[in-house]
Image (cartoon, helix red, strand yellow):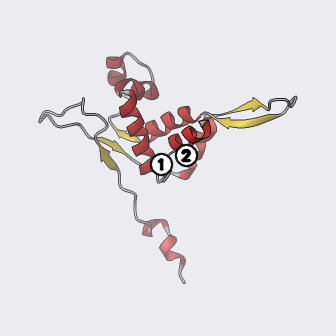
Amino acid sequence: MSLSAFLAENAIAVENIKFAASNRFLSEEGKPMLWEMKTITSTEDEALRKSCAKQVTVPGRKNQYQRETDYDMYLGKLAVACTVYPNLNDKGLQDSYGVMGAEALLKTMLTPGEYANYIGKVQEVCGFDVTLQDEVEEAKN
């Protein structure tokens, strides 16, 4: 058995996905504009998760803390990291919506339903079978 199949140059590249995130943004032909998404590496994903984690006190235990992830923040950062087009960091685009920052822009551009669908598609592109939003909803119940 050869390990050559595992070499980076032999791995099949993950294709970017194009997705109509909203029917409200139309091309000159009157068709919904396609947004482009890419997957990120596990290392990038881990960094995103860590940036969304905070230490919270354990109830009833003095001076004991546990790490908790803000999944809404994580999903927003994941969506931004995976979005290739439109460029959410474009100052002109942010100015047109009166917001600062790519995450704020994405949440302002899309309606709540569109945003939820977009987050689901981003998770699918990244290879998550069960979306984190589903896990969050399950944990709430």
Residue identifier under label 2 = 45
Residue 80: percent from left, percent from top = 44, 36
In the image, taking residue 43 as reference, residue 116 lies left or right, namely left
What residue do we see at 57% from left, 41% from top?
Answer: 138
Judge the density around disc 2: few (<14), some (14-19), many (≥20) Cα neighbours within 10 Å. Answer: some
Say what amino acid the circle numbered 1 marks: Ile
**Closer to us: 111 or 39:** 111
What residue do we see at 40% from left, 60% from top?
Answer: 13
* Label whose residue precedes the other's in the sequence (1 or 2): 1
Residue that extends furthest to the right in the rendered view of this protein: 62
The image quarter in which residue 23 lies:
top left
Q: Secondary structure at mark 2?
A: helix
Residue 59: percent from left, percent from top = 80, 30
Judge the density around disc 1: few (<14), some (14-19), many (≥20) Cα neighbours within 10 Å. Answer: some
Q: Secondary structure at mark 1?
A: loop
- Measure how far apart labels 1 and 2 are at the Cα level: 7 Å
Vertical order, 33 against 110 (above or below): below
In the image, taking residue 35 as reference, residue 116 lies left or right, namely right
In the image, taking residue 98 as reference, residue 134 lies left or right, namely right
Report the number of discs.
2
Say what amino acid the circle numbered 2 marks: Asp
Residue identifier under label 1 = 40
In the image, taking residue 29 as reference, residue 91 lies left or right, namely right
What residue do we see at 60% from left, 33% from top?
Answer: 70
Residue 139: percent from left, percent from top = 61, 40
Q: Could you tell me if the residues under marks 1 and 2 are in contact, i.e. CB atoms within 8 Å? A: yes
Residue that extends furthest to the top in the rendered view of this protein: 98
Residue that extends furthest to the front in the rendered view of this protein: 141
